[in-house]
Image (cartoon, helix red, strand yellow):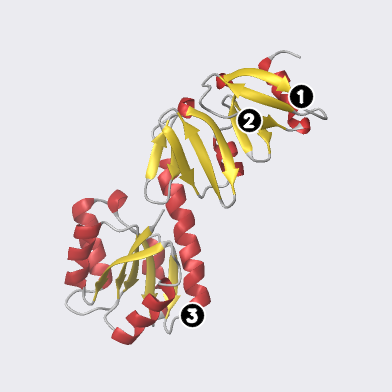
Amino acid sequence: MKLRAIVAEDEPLAREELLEVLARDPEVVVVGEAEDGEMLFDLLSRHRPDALFLDIEMPRRSGLQALERWIARHGAEAAPLVVFTTAYERYALEAFNLEAVDYLLKPYDAARVERALRRLKARLRERSTSSAPAGKLLVDDGERYVVLDPKEILYAERKEREIVVHTLRGPIRSRMALAELEERLQGGPFLRVHRSFLLNLDYVDSIEPWANGAYTVYLKDANHPPIPVSRGAAKALFDRLGRR
């Protein structure tokens, strides 16, 4: 999923320097640039970004004042994740009080900006996961978060650098790791039957021997292809299904 960001920086050279580093990350989209506090307030209301790179000292209204005013009107829950950008270390306490994700000193160091981005993405994933309704699962398909009931999932398979989650409503592609999906579905009727397949056992129709102790699973929905079961996962499969 794209990380939508606003850059609030009144110094043109510093702003261009930061934008250049952000542009290297294909997952980051800068939806607005603010040169002063009033412009920042308007952009926050218009775009509702995921993240804000905030220069504290800005004309007309400081970046900090603009953010605090916006939070007072819309609530802290709606506020973007914040990375403070400043030439002065004295603002570190304000950054801590506002639970900033990171604190960048000018001139910008590309490696530090990239680390801040990693922190932003991790925090955004945490926020999105915690906001899911009870019993639901959020799956990032690259454009949005799809809310799924685990019961909808037939199986998931790994394909190169992504996974395909096959559901009752159709396939959903995601950059999530299969191991992460498996962990988030723990406690349900799911089993990793192959290094590339995670299976919902509630949809198993039949199991056939294949070769060398491996098996093939056929789903109740015949429109889906057979799913391989590795030799190492076969015992767990039969144990979970209660027969051998």
Residue at the spot of label 3: 109
Q: How far apart, in angstroms, are the residues tagged by discs 2 and 1?
A: 16 Å
* Residue at 51% across, 26% down: 223
Q: How far apart, in angstroms, are the residues tagged by discs 1 and 3?
A: 52 Å
- How packed is label 2: few (under 14 Cα within 10 Å), some, or many (20 or more)? many
Q: Nearer the viewer, mark 2 or mark 1?
A: 2
* Residue at 48% across, 46% down: 174
Tell me, yes or no, whether the two marked residues, 2 and 1, touch with CB atoms within 8 Å. no
Q: Nearer the viewer, mark 1 or mark 3?
A: 1
- How packed is label 1: few (under 14 Cα within 10 Å), some, or many (20 or more)? some
Nearest to the observer: residue 19 or residue 100: 19
Amino acid at circle 2: Ile
* Residue at 39% across, 40% down: 146
- Compared with 89, 201 (above or below) is above
* Residue at 58% across, 39% down: 157
- Residue placed furthest toward the right: 212
Residue at the spot of label 2: 227
Amino acid at circle 1: Lys
Q: Is residue 94 left or right of residue 224?
A: left
Amino acid at circle 3: Asp
Nearest to the observer: residue 32 or residue 109: 32
Q: Is residue 237 left or right of residue 41?
A: right
The disc label shown at residue 235, or none: 1
Secondary structure under tag 1 reads helix
- Compared with 239, 50 (above or below) is below
Q: Residue 12 location, x and y as percent?
A: 29, 84
Secondary structure under tag 2 reads strand
Q: Residue 129 location, x and y as percent?
A: 44, 43
